[in-house]
Image (tube, helix red, strand yellow):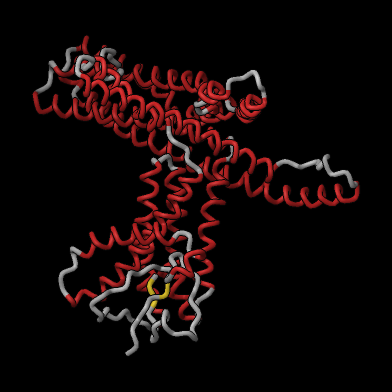
Amino acid sequence: MALSYPYNLNSNPYIKQNFAFRANNTENQSSAPLAKPIESVQKTIENSVDSFVKTMDEEKEKKSNKKAIAVGSSVLVLTGLVALLNPKYSSKFVDKLKSWSTKAGVRFEKNKNDYLASKFHKGCQKALNWGIRTLEFSNNINSAKDIGFKWLCCEKKTFANVKNKTFRKFLQKIDSGFVKIMSKVHNAITVWFDKISKKTVFFKYNRASKKMNEFEALAKQYRSKLSPAQQKELDAKLLEITKQRQFFSKSNTTNRLAEQENLMGNLERDFMTQFNAYRKGFKNRWVNKADHIDKNMTFWAEKILEPTRNSVEKQGANAVEKIIGNGKDKKGLYDDIYNLLSENINAEEKALLEKTMNKAGKKLRKANFSECVEYFDKKRDLVLGGAPTDIVTAVAGLGISGAAIATADSKEERISRALTGGFPVIAGIGASMAFTAMLFSGVQGLLLGAATSVGLSKLGSIADNLITGKKDEPIKNDKKPTENPFRPQEVQYA
């Protein structure tokens, strides 16, 4: 949010600088920890947008755009901070890195006689393997932090190490009240994230179901072109599909999602057992420390649940393959229907039937992947207490936003900052976290959250003008100050 003042705030000794994301000078740097990353992102976006603004008549709109871009930049940095402090690297991303590592290994074998090429591919494979192991192990730190915060909020403490009985009882009483409140908050946040994730799975299955209905409707439409024997065979196939589709019904899917939670019942205990064994390994003088570290460079929670997840994935894949095959050598019931009909319909009908079948198969595979992989990984993080710590990290960053609004010099200024800066930032971060709960990837969540904040900032500018009666004036000086939603801008004396 950009603000204009009738004075040069940096040069006027009588006006105190407001707290901001980005400091105005070196003395203010300590109070603006997110200044440089926000300014860097903001300038990059502004340079791209400014190339589309061609006339001076559009300066007013450009100023409003700059406010929105600055807000979006702030959201990107703050949600990036959440991701940095709470990285849950998906197995899909790590699997991609593993695939690149395997390809680098293959190229190394092919180029063994070429010294430079073999060295390059070997180096790439080594770097990728190191990156994979580092990313996987970093999740352990965050899992331990999540479990620790969950213990702080939800478990009553005995304070057995406090020798003074009176003081110990006092601490227990304080802790009891804290846990009574915070356990409800912690559980509510976890349940909320879980509900969003489950609804995403149901939504994807609903979309798949619609596409499957379209394919089966076409099959019934073309049924009359078959011989009586073929019609009987088609009816049998459709009846079998109806039975197989019960696996993907909402009630059965709900039961499977609940079963996933039951399968993770001992996850926290098993993780802490691994964690404690890891710590004790450094105290054992008979254990080689380098080997000890090397053997534990994995994501423990994922490793603990690997057999369970493999079983869940296999069950889902088998159900999918019975209907649509595996896309390679194994054919499903849809393939049988397509082959049965294709010999008796014209080229246009055949193309439509194939297109509809492929779309249905693609939607069903995506929905099943969402259930068996994406939701499974999200549920694992929720069981360990990941959602509340994400919220805490975001709230800590938003404290800066609140401080920027609170330090405004007037009521109108506070309203303006809240509408065009504070609220869009809060809503953008909330949207980013909601998209992540909806099983979007981390990058998609960041970008969609930033886009939400930009749109809300534009609406906030309109509302600000209506409420305060203020109009954005074009920037007249040749050197336009870089705007930030939480920093008062320099305006030269008239």
| Quarter of the image where one finds residue 489 | bottom left
Q: Residue furthest bottom?
A: 494
Residue 23: give x, y in percent of width and height.
44, 68
Residue at 30% x, 61% y is 43
Residue at 13% x, 17% y is 344
Tell me how many marks there are: 0
Quadrant assignment for the N terminus: bottom left
Quadrant assignment for the C terminus: bottom left
Q: Observer-nearest residue: 479 or 174?
A: 479
| Quarter of the image where one finds residue 484 | bottom left
Question: On the rendered structure, is 154 left or right of 44?
Answer: right
- Residue 249 in sight in this render: no
| Quarter of the image where one finds residue 462 | bottom left
Residue 274: give x, y in percent of width and height.
61, 25
Residue at 29% x, 32% y is 211
Residue at 38% x, 86% y is 6
Q: Residue furthest top?
A: 229
Residue 187: give x, y in percent of width and height.
62, 44
Residue 321: give x, y in percent of width and height.
34, 18
- Residue 33 in sight in this render: yes
Question: On the rendered structure, is 5 left or right of 168?
Answer: left
Question: On the rendered structure, is 184 left or right of 196?
Answer: right
Q: Residue furthest left?
A: 347
In the rendered image of this protein, does residue 170 appear above or below residue 104? below
In the rendered image of this protein, does residue 286 appear above or below residue 34? above
